[in-house]
Image: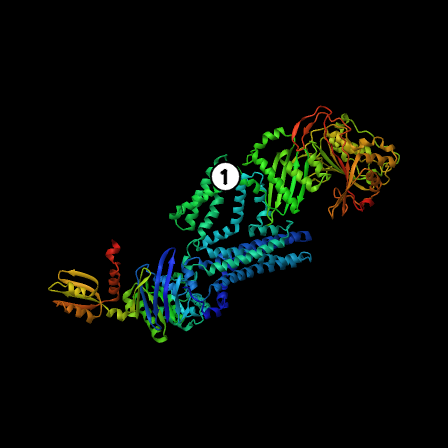
Amino acid sequence: MISIENIKKTFDGVTALDGVTAAVSDGSIFGLIGSNGSGKSTLLRIMSGIYREDSGSVLYDGEPIFENYAMKQRVIYLSDEQYFLPHATLDEMRAFYRSAYDNFDDAMYKKLTDVFGLDRTRKINTFSKGMQKQSSLLLGLSVRPKYLLCDETFDGIDPVMRQLVRRMIADDVAENGMTAVISTHNLRELEDLTDHICLLHRGKILIDRELDDMKLSIHKVQVVFDRDPAEAISALDVISHETHGKLHVLVCRGSEEEISAALSSASPIYSEIIPLTLEEIFISEMEGIGYDAKNVTE
Amino acid sequence: MTQKMSPNKKRAPLVTWRYMAGTARRGWPLFVLFLIMFLLVYTLWTAINLQNLTEIYNVRRLVSTLNVLFSNLSALSAIISGIYFMQFIQSKTSAGFFHSLPERRSGHFISVIFSSFAVYLAASLSSYILSFLLLALSGALYAEILPTLLLIPVLGIFYFIVFLSVTVLAGVISGNRVIHAIMTAFLLFAAPVVFITAMLLLWDGVRFLNVSEMIYSLDTLKWLSPFFRAIYVLDGDTGFPAWILILFDAVLAAVGFFLAYYAYENRPIERSGNPIVFPVLPEIIKYIIIGPTAVLSSKFFELFEDGWGVFGFIVGLVLSFMLCNTVLYRSARAMFSHIRGMLIYSGALIVAVLILSFGCFGIFDYMVPVADSIEVNFSSNSYGGGGAIVSDPAEIAAVRRAVSQMNGQLRNRGAYGGDADVYADSIERAERTESLHINYKTPFGFELSYSYSDLPYEYIAPLAETILEVYGDGSGYSDYLKNSTRLYLNINMMLPASSIFDSIPEGTEAASSVPDDEEMPGASWEWLAGITPGDNTADTYRGALTKAYASGDIYCWRGQTLENDPISEVILPSGREYFQHFSMGSLSAEGKNTGYDGNIYSNLVDMADLPLFPSSLSKIGDAFDRTLVLSKNFQCSSIPFYVGDAFDGVFSLSEDEYFDALAETIESIEVYNKKTGGRTIYTDDQVRSMLPSLAAVRATDISPFTATDDDYNVMVVAKSLDDRYDWGSQYVFDDDGTYTGDTGDGEGEFKYLYSITWFLEGQVPDFVR
């Protein structure tokens, strides 16, 4: 289990993380989403022991990660910017990983290179961006980590390979109890993969919930009233509200039952409660705090 | 809240061998580079010189060169390998990757050191062993040079470690490779540059500070950079114990590694990619750079024309400020950031210059450095040189007070601000000027030199008096300080009397006169060259000397300037840098003239007449069978003054009469114990009683100007003869040496000094012991 406790980190006077607290259960896939510059990468780098937090703590099974040799053997961090030794081939990188990690699995390495169809003797800097991402991922997975930290790992990989990667991670979590923390802006993919979502904005957590809970607790409502709906709407926890003639489009917090009950008091002519996608939830929540396209462009 | 150290971390190794070995293996391109470098320079140089190794002298020279080459290559290798192996922390991406690996920072740090060392060692030792074998095969492995040869890699490894410590420290604080290289140079040379700048600033206010001597001298610079220390040690002939510098470097290397490790442990990895990763450092580095740049730029522009220094200062300051900002903050937008700090800094620099220039706050008093010992050397165009080394704390304090007083006088009379012209007026009035060189050895081993040129005597009077107090009157030094003789010719003669005069038949009377002036032009060097050892007649030598002088072909120095052409090689078998030295047969003589304007001919007469007493006619028995060096200070005007003058008719004297006559001319006999520093002065009747004993001493060898007893020097100091002669109109000086006017004819009170110094070799007279 990863316990993130009140993490603060400042760069040159700019607060990147401001009291972030979260918990990642073992054997889960933890989705880390947020606006640009929200602190996702910083959090992941602190979680991987690269950065030292200004205050707070990151504990893996009760142990800090920073400068912890044994714990780092169990953690792989896949950065959004891949690094490979200059002019190295995959096999040379494998040798390097073997010199650093006790559990490097040669069989897994061979299997994954075959699966991805990568030439092990070719210099990695001649690979495409997507192939380099695949290389980074396969090397990381060959370590057999207990904790996998991915920072926009899927970006740049073609859909077929993304599907493959997602499946591999899901299998590893299911079969080996691996815990994955995945940061990405591709919320559609994350929705299929993750168990738990943490939404960061400006260094703070806006949402930290199980994905299913979150989906059940926020809904889109399309409703038409024949009389003033103010009273009914005021009873709802509205995140956003748009009107198109008599049609009200609302995004509300609360279960479907709670929302139905609130609407029924106003006897709507028509109402429909629709579950939101993760992307819609993200947009709605961001709009709710004033971070929407309209405000940004203005 | 900061994280607590886990039990796992405590158990974790500082470094894992597997990772460290892997890092070293990745350095193979560097190994290839180093191997080529060492082979092409070190081994190839050995091979090229193999043909010249038949003599051990050549082998020794080669080994010395190889030592320098190996150490230089080692230092260069350290810098290259340090930069190479630390590149992993010089970009954000690689730093992130490597620090996500299961390796502690200590592991990364030790891996860098180990890998650098392993790669260097493999390459350099391969080359060394190959060179060693080449030397062995060529039969050049003399037992005498073997220890030096074996020490070559030891010294090389040492300097590799020293320079690696600097490079690693620079790497930890840098955030990219280019800055890493720049910071390495910065750490190596910042201290000397700052020192030179400080000296130049001080020089603005204190012209007496001998800046050039210090900023170009390894004596000082060696303490400020391992680069200069390495040069100093490798030079090998410096007189300063090399082990102290090596120990100093070893300590600094240890401190460097420790600082680097500490800084690395606390290195903010998130700032990798920035030029300098520690936010506080760019400002410090910037001001260390822009100050010297501004001052040096000012000095550079001053070379063109006075007054352009201000322009140079501003240009240097502003440009370096902008450049530093751009580089250190990696943005042209930062070019003018922190401009307030720059203004404050430049203001402080200007204030410092003004304080120095105007001598505010008694700064001149503070310009007398604290010292463990002070060497004071006087030299004047009228007195020659004299010096003293003061090391007693009380005496040092007295000298410092005197110098402070002198500096104060100079300040009060406007002799500050680097305006040497302020002396001019007083120099014109003063008949006696002095140049003064004071060398302070500070407690930290720095040497600060002060030079005062052509200073009127009145300025140095307090210091002169102090030195007198330290050394006591009657030391000879006091004569230098007290007397007013303007010009002198100092002639030392070494007379191996037996070899000169033995060929003179008994009963032959030496010439009692010397050729007249009219006879002189006929002298030719061919004639002199024709003199062969053994053709030793008093007349011949006396004539030869006379003609040598009269023809003007003699070494004659005014200060450091050679005024006349040297006597030809016939007379001067080997050039001497100081002292005229001529040798004819077994007679050697050296002369020194620091400013003659008189009739040197008459002095030659003095000199020639003085010692030339054939042993067979000598009234002191075997007196001439000793090495006798006569040192005589002459007045270079046409005054018929010479020791021989006191011995008119000496050849007809009995031995006792000779000693009586000789005693009349002697003021004192001084015995100086070189071991204890003690000095005993004998006068009056004691002198007379000692002369036979002195005369009885035999010499065993001739060694020009070094013929002294291990323990004693014996000086025979002649009486002043001012009461015998009418000196004519002379200058009059007060006690401080200030010129006060002229006397009437015959009223001069010069104390013309001459001394006869007998340096006794081998035995010393009984009375000495």
Question: Image quarter for residue A261?
Answer: bottom left
Identify the residue at horizontal 71%, vertical 41% (top origin): B472
Protein chain holding label 1: B
Q: Is residue B475 above or below residue B551?
A: below
Identify the residue at horizontal 44%, vertical 44% (top origin): B344
Question: The N terminus of chain B lies in which quarter of the figure?
Answer: bottom left
Q: Position of residue B406 (x, y in %)?
A: 60, 37
Q: Residue furthest left?
A: A226
Between B242 and A242, the one nearer to me in the picture: A242
Question: Image quarter for residue B725?
Answer: top right
Residue annotated with mark 1: B354
Colour convention: rainbow
Between B25 and B195, the one nearer to me in the picture: B195
Q: Position of residue A33 (x, y in %)?
A: 31, 64
| Left/right of residue B237 with respect to residue B512 in the rendered view | left
Q: What element carries label 1?
A: helix
| Left/right of residue B480 with respect to residue B306 in the rendered view | right
| Left/right of residue B468 with respect to residue B530 in the rendered view | left
Between A97 and B41, the one nearer to me in the picture: A97
Q: Position of residue B243 (x, y in %)?
A: 62, 55
Please name the amino acid that badge 1 sits on: Leu
- Graded by Cα atoms within 10 Å as few (under 14), some (14 to 19) or many (20 or more), the crowding at tag 1 reads some
Q: Residue furthest bottom?
A: A175
Q: Is residue B122 above or below residue B297?
A: below
Q: Specify whether residue B28 is in view.
A: yes
Q: Where is residue B205 in the image (x, y as percent from the top left)?
A: 54, 39
| Left/right of residue B374 with respect to residue B336 in the rendered view | right
* Number of marks: 1
Q: Specify whether residue B577 is in view.
A: no
